Amino acid sequence: MARVRTSAIHIGALNVVLQPHSPELYLRMFMTLAKGKFDARVRGDDAILLGSCHYLDKDNPLMGGRGDLYKFLKLDATEAWFNTREMDEASEDDVAELNIPDYLKPHFRKFQYIFFPKGHRMYIITKKAKQSLSQDQVKRFLTTVFERAEFAGFGQLSVTVQPDPNGLLEMLSLKRISKLRMEIDRPNPDDHEDLEEEILRRLNRMNARTEKLEYLEASNTGLVVDEEVRALADVAKDNGFVYVEGKDADNVKQYLSTKNMPLHVTARYNPNLMSEFDAFYDKVVEVNQDILRAQ
């Protein structure tokens, strides 16, 4: 019997928060990104452009949006060129022979995304068949493009790379925690989560964008992390970050941060029976439900 060859896609996520917010505003933001064809460099000459945005369900627009992110090289043509025949910098005459239109960009890659207004999570295919796109790069793209005048009416934007749901548990389970630091950007309470509502009210009242908390042990027995602090850490991991220093069960010093524990899930599928999008959608619906249940 012939072996069935499967394909795999790797998926990450971002928590995209607008203040003030509404499902309609989120979708309008993504539509504006797609319509404007704005690009931004995200690392070196690597650039990203959000190329399209369509409703997941035309009969239920607020269900969410889907589309493609384009990754390519945005070269500076005024920089020096290398002549591989001469093994030296290209001459002005060599460069004058170049005739590449500005609208053509090399190293093009395309990655699908899905955005759910409920929970305001953006899911991204981060790796497939020798192609990769990191969540940090997409975060940098969004925050950079959002500085444009076209987005002035959308309020404040904060973007957090969605951490692994088990990462915080690992961090707070250290044998001894000597330092605990949390940074909480303005959250976007869905379904009126009491703690997020309280934090948002406090930040709004103080005209503050971010809340920073740090706890240091009073003795070498370590911090006692109670339920109240655990709840704050749970908000911080999705709306900022959590960082701990301490020692594990083997008495080895540990420095852990949710920034270094991004969500990573894999979807495998038979391309003869299922499209990449269907495999992607089925997996992120499952993951998004788990994230919403945990809130």
Image (cartoon, rainbow, N blue to C red):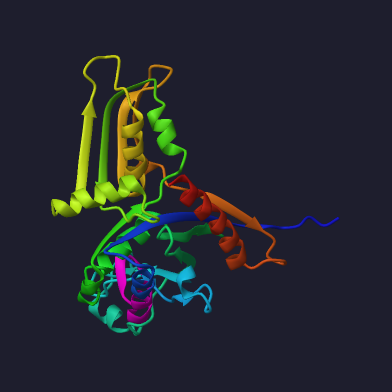
Where residue 7 sits, quadrant-wise, is bottom right
Q: Which residues are magenta?
A: 30-48
Is residue 58 visible from the viewing direction of this image? yes
- Above or below, 95 against 287 in this view is below
- Above or below, 93 against 211 in this view is below
Q: Position of residue 33 (x, y in %)?
A: 34, 74
Q: Residue furthest top?
A: 220
Q: Position of residue 294 (x, y in %)?
A: 46, 45
Left/right placement of residue 126 relative to residue 157 reads right
Query: Residue 110 colored magenta?
Result: no
Q: Residue at x 30, y 14 (%)?
A: 221
- Above or below, 14 against 172 in this view is below
Placement of the N terminus among the 4 image quadrants: bottom right
Where residue 72 sits, quadrant-wise, is bottom left
Where residue 21 sits, quadrant-wise, is bottom left
Is residue 208 visible from the viewing direction of this image? no
Q: Residue at x 31, y 39 (%)?
A: 232
Query: Residue 31 colored magenta?
Result: yes
Q: Position of residue 55 (x, y in %)?
A: 48, 75
The mark total stands at 0
Q: Residue at x 57, y 54 (%)?
A: 286
Q: Residue furthest left?
A: 206
Q: Residue at x 48, y 65 (%)?
A: 114
Q: Residue furthest right?
A: 1
Left/right placement of residue 266 relative to residue 153 reads right
Q: Position of residue 44 (x, y in %)?
A: 30, 61
Left/right placement of residue 36 relative to residue 285 reads left
